Image (cartoon, grey):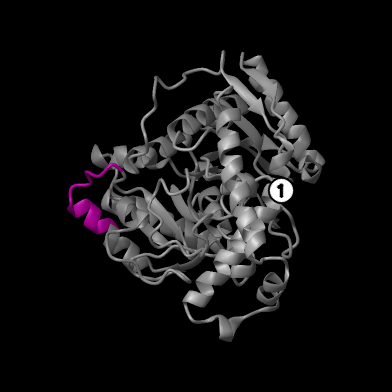
Amino acid sequence: MSQRAFAGAAQISRAVREGEATACGIARRALRRIEAYDPLVGAFAEVDPAEVLARAEAVDAGGGCGRLAGATLAVSEALATREAPAPGAGRPTPGTTCVDLLRGHGAVLLGRTRVSGPAGDGPTRNPHALDRLSGGISSGAAAAVAAGFCALALGLQNAGCTIVPASFCGVWGWKPTWNAVATEGLGGGSPSCDTLGIFSGRSADLGLLADLFEMDPLLGPAPDRLGGLRIGLCRGPLPDRVRPPMREAFDDAARRLRLEGAEVIELRLPGLFEGLETAHARILARESRAARLNRKMAEHVASEDDRGARAGGLGPSEMRAAYALADRCRSEFEELATGFDAVMTPSACDEAPSGPEDPGDAAMNAIWTLLHVPVVSVPGMTGPHGLPLGMSIITPRYTDRMTIAVASLVGEVLGLEAAMA
């Protein structure tokens, strides 16, 4: 099962605009593939073929002129759409969500993808190895792209829910700068951490979405080669959590960048950053609980985890300290990052797991989510079992276009972009 089964969103829309394909034809092909293979993968929670074809017909009837005309799109159950709310998000005002934006440019929504882990009802299997999992909350969205069901998929990140599944499934994953993309309709429940997650089979599609999301422009020309770029090699504040397959792949990726002329320099985070994982966990737990209380559900659905969070050192002083540490580390990282064009770190701790109780360790992701920086997981590396391993490219806040530009160059070196050209 291969993500190469489908062209990228930009390629699809170009073909539709130029009359070489129709949105209906693309949609029918996607539906056939979903019918054939999703019983094995379990990426989708719901697909209504009649609705999908009606949406595609509307794109064709409108002349197929949008920048995403005919591009197939899947959306996680963690995000609200005009047809269905998300848990905790309710039904958004029409026209206000990122899903509405992409559909307005001609993307054809195929359906909603499953949420795995504590928020869902079971694991989504990994298209690269059906005895392995696809990750946590956004795993269905990542698997849908990896299986070739769709060109684009949207998910959620509040820890590692986008970047880890992207690594496990061997697809591109982008967590934009916090609050740089509309959060209306996100169902995570943590205002300080919730961020849209984007999956694609091609880096060019991330650049296209950056245009549609009107991300801040680059201050200078985009880099067109790795030679001369300064890349900070960050093994994270918790390097002992990274398992040998990822450590070896990370070192190999760094070696390849050096061979391309990049100046790769070890970047050690200050000791201050070691407290960010705990700060993230406290902030996420407190804000998620507050969201449940605000929905007047806590007295009915309070779990052992909720009671543990209330008793686990989440008083006012601890919460003030957690927020203060996050603010301080954001400023510290901005200063650290000025010496580099980008930072590279592992996207996950290991290859995709096999046990349903293990959605993947977010130790390599939680701090970047709390720091609010843009992250792109670059596919292309593999571990000893032939399973994908991603490398994350990170730049300062509001420099998403630089993140995507450097990640695209890294993708060429790691091999996937060249193989799919």
Residue 150 in view (yes/no): no
Would you place residue 44 above or below residue 410 in this image?
A: below
Residue drawn at x 43%, y 32% is 401
Residue drawn at x 60%, y 72% is 121
Residue drawn at x 44%, y 37% is 398
Q: Nearer the viewer, residue 52 or 312?
A: 312
Query: Which residues, given as a range, are shown in magenta?
Result: 56-67
Q: Nearer the viewer, residue 45 or 243?
A: 243
x then y, percent, for residue 260: 61, 16
x then y, percent, for residue 354: 75, 58
User: Does the magenta segment cover residue 182?
Assistant: no
Q: In what element is the residue under mark 1?
A: helix
Quadrant of the rendered image containing residue 238: top right
Left or right of residue 264, residue 299 in this image: left
Would you place residue 188 above or below residue 255 in this image?
A: below
Q: Amino acid at mark 1?
A: Gly
Residue holding disc 1: 275
Residue drawn at x 34%, y 67% is 92
Left or right of residue 136, residue 131 in this image: right
